[in-house]
Amino acid sequence: MPKILLIEPVLAHYQKDVFKIFTNDKEFDFDIIAGRSYQGINSLQDEYSLFDYCTFKILNHTFYYLRGAVKYALSEKPDAIICTGVDFHLLHTILIFFIYRIVFRKRFYWWSHASSGNQGKFGFFIRKLFYKTSSGIFAYNRAGKINLNLMGIADQKIVVVNNSLNREDYGYLNHDLYNKKEGIPFTILYSGRVTKAKKVDILIKALGILDKKSVFEFKCYIVGDGNLEELIKITHELNISDKIEFVGAKYGKDVHPYFLNSDLLVYPGGIGLSAVHSLSFGLPILTTDNLPLHFPEFELIKPGYNGDLFMDNSFEDLANKIVEWRNKLIINKEIYVNNCLKQIKDLGYLPEIVSSRVLDFMKSEFLL
């Protein structure tokens, strides 16, 4: 049975189902290692092997080295290694690649956003070299595959696997979405980390416009921890503190009621997995038209079909879009719920599909 070593920066909770499918597979012996904690995120515990990071800074860049990872890889002697995408800040992954792929000539695969990076021409050349000399790349979305093709990497080395949450986090897998609340007040949701980059203040200012014009009655839930003091201050200045509820961080099933009782997700900054979460509950998404800010899961959003884009940083344009989508949902909400769910299913943003695409490719490499 071929032995596969998967190396992650951290074992994120949202990937638990994918990891379980790997470790339960009958045709491969999967071993998974990661850091105990990475950039404030703690790893899943379970039966995985976890190590500590050594970190240091050079010219305002933070570098990470996973103590014990190289020794572990060499002692376990896997038949192949799958590693998170080319990131020059994760020094152990670069070292393991050189040892395992370049020196030992063993199978080595990147699991990557497959972006061209922001390191200039030299950084682009090095990144391209790492991808081209690998055994294959698992790309998070179709745009990643296009980037790799532009680097000169052949289609047969690339598999688009997408991304996913755990099954317990998908609305339509756990609830009857067509019995959701209807009518007044129209409810808007933001769910995610509350940081400056997420621009939640743009949402609050847009709601201030709607309230001032008395367009319609609304309620807003802001789910997530972070920099709340300034946002709360803005709600008081706009006299809409009674219409906006700061819920704090919610995880797993605790966040479901907020999705079930909302009509629309507004995400003013770059969106990633929150797109999967929202669409799985049948909630259309409004987000910024500043495309470079977004993460691979943004490809799920089709303007006019299951969401829309507003002019970046324009709370006036966002206010207009909220009105537009409120009117659409009043006329035929069921159509848009169906559109949201269909996009997840059509593109395969489910843990069993993500894992099967990885496993099928590995079977083609080892077993066929």
Image (cartoon, rainbow, N blue to C red):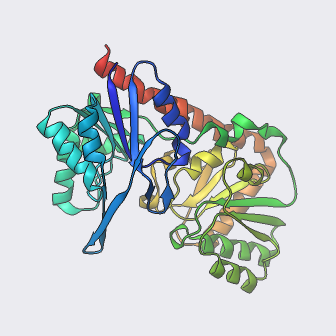
Residue 306 seen from this side = no
Classify residue 183 as left or right of residue 323: right
Q: Viewer-proximal residue, 204 or 171?
A: 171
| Relative vertical location of residue 290 with respect to residue 253 in this rendering, above or below | below
> Where does the image place residue 251, in percent across and percent down from the top left?
66, 53
Q: Viewer-proximal residue, 347 or 357?
A: 357
> Where does the image place residue 128, in percent across and percent down from the top left?
20, 47
Task: Please report the residue visible at 73 percent of the width from the left and 37 percent of the height from the top.
Answer: 174
Classify residue 167 as left or right of residue 212: left
Q: Quadrant of the C terminus?
A: top left
Q: Quadrant of the N terminus?
A: top left
| Relative vertical location of residue 52 with respect to residue 367 in this rendering, above or below | below
Residue 218 seen from this side = yes
Q: Viewer-proximal residue, 304 or 133?
A: 133
> Where does the image place residue 119, in percent across and percent down from the top left?
24, 62
| Relative vertical location of residue 227 with respect to residue 176 in this rendering, above or below | below
Task: Please report the residue visible at 70 percent of the width from the left and 41 percent of the height from the top.
Answer: 171
